Image (spheres, rainbow, N blue to C red):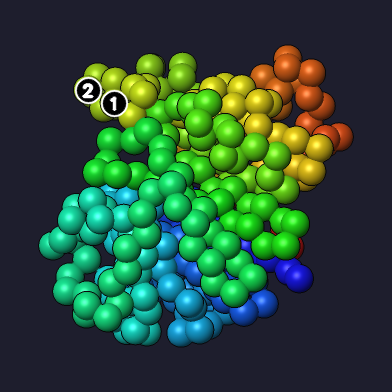
Amino acid sequence: MSLHFSVLASGSTGNAVYVESEEHSFLVDAGLSGKQMESLFQQIDRDMGKLSGILVTHEHSDHIKGVGIIARKYRLPIFANEKTWQAMDGLIGTIPVEQKFTFDMETVKSFGSLSIESFGVSHDAAEPMFYTFHHGDKKLVLITDTGYVSDRMKGIISNADMYVFESNHDVQMLRMGRYPWNIKRRILSDVGHVSNEDAAIAMSEVAGDRTKRIYLAHLSLDNNMKDLARMSVSQTLEGKGIQVGEQFSLFDTDPKIPTPLTAV
């Protein structure tokens, strides 16, 4: 029984995560061009044509840019909730009916030994949701693009083996940066993105005795840096009594370079 994943790309320029079991493999979002996505798959030595489907989290362009062209080229099923399907209309081109599937929020779909659980997040999209993968006794959680992590979310994602967790911005960099105030206000809001410190507080409340790795994801190119995110998250966790490197380790993600294919 094995579950593997790679964060193919993560950041404001495009997001995509690859997850596979022995029988099935899924792409969660495809926020880069078809050509870029194919290059990322080559880097992890995987064939996009063998995917079981594409799971969409929400309709923002940094998550769906390549969805339509990839699905048409490789005749892949696309899974999204009804409101996201409506919001994507006109953004990903025409998708044949036989490739369109509804994945409702707060539900579980099973594909052989792999179960995928959807859960809602707080973001300024039609009905944004992310996914928890269950396989045997392993649990992988993907959670980005949320303004905060609610108690309901914490209950769903608690004590996973591994997390891909949003650590979007440093609050001071964002406040002092070049963005207009309306954009800053959106990012800082409950339907924006979580900061390094808020992400760490949520991590301290959901990480359990089985948690081994947390990948810091969706870092802002303008308002964060890998070293800063890792330092801020580590310091906040240590303030909560969690020593990074002992209970679990932190890992970077990148807008252009996939993380190594890793067993959960």
Question: In the shown orientation, is residue 220 left or right of residue 42?
Answer: left
Please provide percent x and percent y for residue 152.
50, 31
Question: Which residue corresponds to the image point at 17% horizontal and 74% vertical from the top-left?
Answer: 94
Amino acid at dot 1: Arg
Question: In the shown orientation, is residue 112 left or right of residue 14?
Answer: right
Which residue corresponds to mark 1?
186
Q: Is residue 169 visible?
A: no
Question: Which residue corresponds to the image point at 47% horizontal and 34% vertical from the top-left?
Answer: 168
Image height of 222 relative to 255, above or below: above
In terms of image quadrants, where is residue 85?
bottom left
Distance between mark 1 and mark 2 Cα atoms = 6 Å
Question: Which residue corresponds to the image point at 61% horizontal and 67% vertical from the top-left?
Answer: 114
Q: How many marks?
A: 2
Please provide percent x and percent y for residue 12.
39, 45
Label 1–label 2 contact, CB within 8 A: yes
Question: In the shown orientation, is residue 41 left or right of residue 68?
Answer: right
